[in-house]
Image: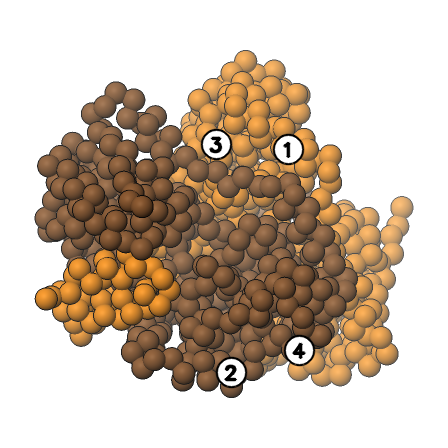
Chain colours: A orange, B brown
């Protein structure tokens, strides 16, 4: 069977371009009432009956026959054995990726995650103390989307942040364990791991059970049940963002081999038929070359069917007037992954305000970022890069303000605070400040 | 009418102490199905009919007679005039508070909010670019909880972050404007302001209307309708946390005048009868002195009734074995405001892991932090300090990863990425990396 992929062709000079682009970008996370109800029931059961409920749901949904939740815990020795049993090349690649991810996140902690303070002229100390979360839960999907790289990308920033305990959950339908996922848990420094999944695993982490310890935050991707459960436990625990389909946007000046760009579009499209791959380029002949490369390479790809569906349904090759205009459109789209396939990427980077990750120059394929460049591959999707950030060390830390007012400072600040507090009708606030004033 | 306040007395040596403390801390944000439905309807109407819907709801709920949404915009001249018309002492206090808040948040930006990058040995660049949000919306409650200090605490971090436009919304029931709120908007550098509120104002900011521009994030406190609307638009825009009742926890070694501590407990309790004030102290005689001070001062307070309800219903004076034990209990509670009323606060501060803001020493009344010490007064409540942070410059910025892989880097990274991508069954990812390898 052969497939054909023809991404939508648009030009910014088309009448109706804005509407056509908006239609192509449209994606909505519909919530399913059946899923919502099922998840509410599961969470309630886990909250009330703890281990027993988690065990029942796990045996039912994952077709396992465990007798106790303790049976579903993976021991550290098993994780280490999985790592040691990998073929040498794979083991080395996993370790090399983990090392690079760790170095990047250590730099991130140093640059933006340390405590600070200063004293003003009155000797009053002001600052912020940064502390790691005590305990976090990492959800790792089982089945077809079981990605060891996601284990690294969630666990390593937590470990670099200094989180005391990292609890991993991963469903193992019919008891089948993915050795690469277990090995990644070993490399990434996961503290404890349980082979449970779905809303019941999210509930176990959020509320705690006899066997699964309660965590302070749950991160990691999952299916619609997991996403719904994360939304529901939010507030009880922290959560990371709820991800939509993956996206790539390539800005091209025509200097990067068309094959490379076509393959980068494929690499996004192969995730999921809802994934989105967009090319923006002022050079019509180059767009044509990319289409030719797509035609030539598509049927060599094992996942050609998914790629074709994704490119036909959601892909676009867009002819722009200039690369400046392409940058403006990119800011409107706020893509998860943004490649600047240009001879002079540093010229364009400052124009790009909204993106999860920016890949500069021909040699920076998005897939290098997915695995081992160092930055996190958990990135904001569906235009949320307008207001949110890659998963990072900062997601596993929290800040506390520090204030130590000197006696001299209390005299000045007390007068200001009292004036404003009386203005707001909060007299006890005012009196608390005034009691510290010298007579 | 006179009131009496007797916070619950507990001792850590009591049998059943843990359960008694848990019961005292219990608070749940019940969602009301009627409110949920009303908010869903309002948001849908605003999304579909824009200005017209916002105008209808505003005239209905706020008892106004506006003919167009443009009429409900506050002009900059009106904000400035409100500031200039304040009594000099109030004007100076507002300006002084704003200046201190700005200095603190500038230090915060410098310490943790700047872009950074490094190159590895292969010449590959890795980093993170920090950019401000384009446009944010700030919700300011009207009526009894109209606090000008909240305008400063929401708008100034946004302005320091470099946000292009700050849109304030504030309901004005029966058209009554609060001059201090308008003045604060002037001082804090609000770009545009509308006298609209409720779920309709949140919808207008999240979706945009003909008159109200769409924003990227909505922050600020509000009633149950506003909180529900913020939860619903989350994803479409960013939101800050949903706040529960305010809390103070005081750790005392007995060296701070008992009056001062009692007044600090009052200052939290006067916000709301659900507010929570807790004292932890190893000195039983001192706890008695605080109760005596409560008895003596309560009926001098204009808000004595609210204070009494709050202290009787949710307050606690807890006798601990030691101050170390008090620190452990504080970490379990993860309070919004934490005072260390000790002769040696720096000794205890490192033991305190979870708190929104920490106030060190006798002179640092919590109320100084509310208005003018500099740090933000928007803080995590209801134990969420376990995983979240004060509102800050970082809430008005987002980060983008930067990766520029050199040709040499692409050779090493490409081999690693391809190995892992094949392991995950993502062949286009692997091929994209391999195409960059030299033959």
In the image, which disc is placed on residue B349? none
In this rendering, the answer to whether A407 lies above or below A345 is: above
| Residue at x-position 63% and y-position 28% | A41
Question: Alpha carbon of mark 2 to alpha carbon of mark 3: how far?
Answer: 50 Å
Asked if marks 1 and 4 fall on the same chain, the answer is no
Q: CA distance from mark 3 to mark 4?
A: 48 Å
Residue that badge 3 annotates = A207
Q: Which residue is mark 1?
A: A39
Can residue B20 be seen in the rendering of this structure?
yes
- Residue A393 x/y as whole percent: 42, 53
Label 4 crowd (10 A; few <14 / some 14-19 / many >=20): some
Q: Same subunit under labels 1 and 2?
A: no
Question: How many angstroms separate mark 3 from mark 1 (CA)?
Answer: 14 Å
Distance of label 1 from label 2 (alpha carbons): 50 Å
Q: Classify the position of the C terminus of chain A by image quarter.
A: bottom left
* B383 over B211 or under it: above or below: above
- The chain to which mark 1 is attached is A
Residue identifier under label 2: B78
Crowding at mark 3 (Cα within 10 Å: few <14, some 14-19, many 20+): many
Task: Name the subunit of mark 4.
Answer: B
Q: Chain of mark 3?
A: A
* Quadrant hosting residue B85: bottom left
Where in the figure is residue A53, as x and y percent of width and height?
Answer: 56, 21
In the image, which is nearer the foreground, mark 1 or mark 2? 2
Residue in the image at 11% along x and 44% along y: B254
Find residue B98 and report its image quarter.
bottom left
Query: Which residue is labeled 4 in the image?
Result: B70
């Amino acid at each position: 069977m052969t497939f054909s992929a023809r991404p939508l062709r648009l030009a910014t000079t088309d009448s109706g371009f804005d509407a056509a682009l908006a239609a192509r970008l449209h994606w909505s996370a519909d919530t399913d009432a059946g899923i919502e109800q099922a998840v509410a029931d599961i969470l309630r059961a886990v909250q009330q009956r703890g281990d027993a409920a988690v065990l029942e749901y796990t045996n039912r949904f994952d077709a396992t026959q465990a007798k106790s939740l303790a049976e579903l815990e993976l021991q550290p020795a098993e994780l280490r054995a999985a790592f040691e049993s990998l073929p040498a090349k794979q083991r080395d690649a996993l370790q090399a990726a983990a090392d690079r991810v760790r170095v990047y996140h250590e730099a991130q902690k140093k640059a933006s995650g340390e405590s600070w303070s200063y004293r003003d002229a009155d000797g009053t100390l002001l600052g912020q103390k940064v502390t790691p979360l005590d305990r976090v839960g990492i959800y790792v999907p089982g089945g077809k989307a079981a990605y060891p790289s996601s284990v690294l990308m969630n666990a390593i920033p937590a470990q670099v942040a200094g989180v005391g305990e990292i609890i991993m959950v991963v469903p193992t339908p019919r008891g089948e364990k993915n050795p690469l996922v277990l090995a990644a848990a070993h490399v990434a420094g996961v503290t404890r791991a349980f082979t449970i999944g779905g809303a019941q695993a999210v509930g176990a982490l959020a509320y705690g059970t006899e066997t699964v310890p309660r965590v302070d935050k749950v991160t990691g991707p999952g299916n619609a049940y997991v996403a719904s459960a994360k939304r529901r436990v939010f507030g009880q625990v922290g959560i990371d963002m709820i991800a939509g389909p993956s996206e790539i946007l390539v800005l091209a000046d025509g200097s990067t081999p068309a094959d490379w760009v076509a393959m980068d579009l494929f690499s996004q499209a192969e995730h999921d038929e809802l994934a989105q791959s967009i090319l923006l380029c002022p050079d019509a002949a180059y767009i044509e070359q990319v289409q030719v490369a797509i035609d030539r390479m598509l049927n060599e790809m094992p996942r050609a069917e998914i790629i074709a569906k994704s490119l036909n349904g959601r892909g676009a090759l867009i002819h722009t007037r200039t690369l400046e205009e392409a940058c403006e459109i990119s800011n409107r789209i706020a893509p998860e992954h943004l490649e600047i396939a240009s001879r002079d990427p540093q010229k364009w980077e400052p124009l790009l305000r909204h993106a999860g990750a920016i890949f500069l120059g021909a040699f920076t394929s998005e897939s290098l970022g997915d695995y081992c460049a160092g930055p996190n591959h958990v990135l904001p999707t569906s235009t949320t890069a307008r207001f949110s950030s890659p998963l990072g060390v900062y997601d596993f830390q929290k800040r506390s303000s520090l204030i130590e007012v000197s006696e001299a400072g209390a005299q000045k600040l007390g007068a200001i605070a009292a004036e404003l507090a009386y203005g707001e009708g909060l007299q006890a606030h005012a009196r608390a400040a005034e009691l510290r004033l010298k007579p």
